[in-house]
Amino acid sequence: MGTTVSLNVQGDVAERFRSVRRRTMELCKPLTPEDMMVQSCPEASPAKWHLAHTAWFFESFILNVFQPGYQLFNEDFPWLFNSYYRSFADFPEKKLRASFSRPGLDEIQRYRSYVDEHLERLLEGNPEPEMLSRVELGANHEEQHQELLLTDVLHAFYTNPLRPAYLEEANGAESDSSEPVRFVSFEGGLVDVGFSGHGFCYDNELPRHRVWLEPYALGNRLVTNGEYAEFIEDGGYSRSELWLSAGWDAIEQNGWKAPLYWNKDESGWRIFTLRGEKRLEELKGAPVSQVSYFEADAFARWAGKRLPTELEWEVAAQSRRVEGNLMDSGRLRPVSAESAKDQISQLWGDCWEWTASAYLGYPGFEPLAGSLGEYNGKFMSGQMVLRGGSCATPQAHIRSSYRNFFQPETRWQFSGIRLAEK
């Protein structure tokens, strides 16, 4: 799941660990204990479970391994808060996590404090390089769960009849500032892809290798809510010729008529966000979000375009700084692109971008040894790759080689659309 941490960055790793742990608790401040028990769909987990599982990771893969005589906080926690590491321990069925009323939130917070205190002692000593590498891995793992916590809260609040906001809107209404999409051309050719350089990456970003790309062009921004509304009004969800067979099956089985958080009343479409429910007119220029791969693919076909491959996206992003509407911006929802003209915009943040690439190992891919190797490799079947991060992704977490992946019918994540052509 992770690779290397330079030997001279012990202080940086320790500070990264502390800042990540603080941020998780800050994200929970707007939540009540009752909010933190909700699991509103099988893909989601209660916020309380996220708090416990991220502590479990540090305890299971670092403290238990590198601290002699370490005493578990609770003998039941190694299996109770295991997610899916089958070689590590048994675990409860995921969809039952909302039934874990015990241990209570106070005990989970004591568990986090206990793990933090023990890990701080290890970091103050002379830690082994492998231990530092695993702490960095654990920090990245927790950042993933920070994003999941927000996406899970969004779904939980959407299913609440009151439709509460996680946070009130920080700024005023957003204007529709989107310009017609333009396509930025790339030469293609023989290019190097995959993680390069020093620092952390997941095992699925390796090895760096060479591929051939034909010339291509990418839309200079993401597809907007307004553009997606045109697709809906043109019968996008009733025209089977636009859809992959499995996508059409998903429409019929799930009754899809619009993206996940869209609802229509006498005044028109309304979209639910972490900042509360808003009218489509307020978010017309913002990127459409919470769409499945099937919806992204159907929209691209309707528009006469296609989705980019993951490596086309990576080559376009390789030389561009990681900056945009990520978690650090504090917006916590996709927002309209600034005027981009003939430049690529919104590569980072706003929405994860569906690609046309199946999630597979690169040539020569080798998962990590032991239980940690289960994180990425065993999911290389029936999943599609997304790139670029979202408005809920920490900025320090994302890079051009980062590969996210979900099943093609998944809609609860901040997932959107960038078009490609040629």
Image (tube, rainbow, N blue to C red):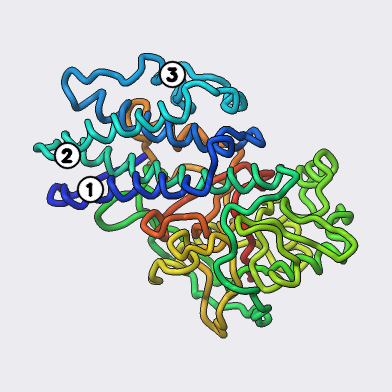
Name the side, left or right, on which 80 lies relative to 68: right
Q: Can you tell which quarter of the image residue 369 is in?
A: top left
The amino acid at mark 2 is Leu
As drawn, 421 above or below 258: below
Image location of residue 68, percent across then percent down? 16, 21
The amino acid at mark 3 is Trp
Q: Can you tell which quarter of the image residue 173 is in?
A: bottom right
Image location of residue 384, percent across then percent down? 59, 47
Q: Residue furthest left?
A: 126
Kindly state the secondary structure of the residue where label 2 is placed: helix
Do tag 1 and tag 2 residues touch (Cβ < 8 Å)? yes
In 3D space, how far apart are the residues under numbered discs 1 and 3 (Cα atoms)?
27 Å
Residue count near mark 2 (Cα–Cα under 10 Å), binned few <14, some 14–19, many ≥20: some
Q: Is residue 137 visible?
A: yes
As drawn, 413 above or below 417: above
Residue position for label 2: 123
Kindly state the secondary structure of the residue where label 1 is placed: helix
Q: Can you tell which quarter of the image residue 289 is in?
A: bottom right
Viewer-closest of 342 and 47: 47
Kindly state the secondary structure of the residue where label 3 is placed: helix
Image location of residue 180, percent across then percent down? 68, 81
Q: First in sequence: mark 1 or mark 2?
A: 1
In 3D space, how far apart are the residues under numbered discs 3 and 2 (Cα atoms)?
26 Å
Residue 125, label in figure: none
In 3D space, how far apart are the residues under numbered discs 1 and 2 (Cα atoms)?
9 Å
Residue position for label 3: 79
Do tag 3 and tag 2 residues touch (Cβ < 8 Å)? no
The amino acid at mark 1 is Val
Residue 13, label in figure: 1
Q: First in sequence: mark 3 or mark 2?
A: 3
Viewer-closest of 120 and 89: 120
